[in-house]
Image (tube, rainbow, N blue to C red):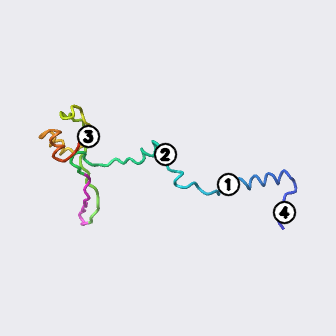
Amino acid sequence: MPSTPRDPDMRLLLLCALALGCSAFAPLPSKQQLRPTGRAAAASSIQMLRVCDITGKKANNANRVTFSNKHNAYWQYPNLQTKKFFSPKLDRTVKLKVATSTIRTIRKLGLDETAAKYGVDLAKF
């Protein structure tokens, strides 16, 4: 037969310890409660895509082939640069993330004509 403490203070102490121990096994909050709200939620949903703002160039999936002819998949990313361009049509500067090949096209044709060629609205930037 298990022994029970006879002292009332000891019983109270055991009861408190038991209550605190059981609260450790309470159910966890749902994912809905853990999700941030407001500005934190908006900031966490933003993903930085490696895509040219004008041409839409993005990463290409390729294989790195070893001497033993093993194929290892990897990504070939475009050479993107963040740069400010002046748009005479909008009469303001526009900050764009563009590939270096697109920078050469902009130097050749001009920003507004290049944007028109690829169907991009510069007012959004």
Query: Picture coordinates of residue 88 (x, y %)?
Result: 18, 33
Q: Out of 48 and 2, give the one closest to the viewer.
A: 48
The residue tagged 2 is 37
Q: Residues within 10 Å of mark 3 (few under 14, many from 20)?
A: some
Report whether 41 appears left or right of 85: right
Please give the range of residues in magenta.
58-69
Task: Give the spatial CA distance, label 2 vs label 4.
Answer: 52 Å
Quarter placement of the N terminus: bottom right
Task: Give the spatial CA distance, label 1 vs label 2.
Answer: 27 Å
Which of pointers 1 and 2 indicates the residue nearer the eye? 2
The residue tagged 1 is 23
Answer with mark 4 or mark 3, whichever residue precedes in sequence: 4
The residue tagged 3 is 96
Let me know if residue 18 is in the magenta part: no
Q: Are marks 1 and 4 in contact (CB under 8 Å)?
A: no
Q: Amino acid at mark 1?
A: Ser
Answer with mark 1 or mark 4, whichever residue precedes in sequence: 4
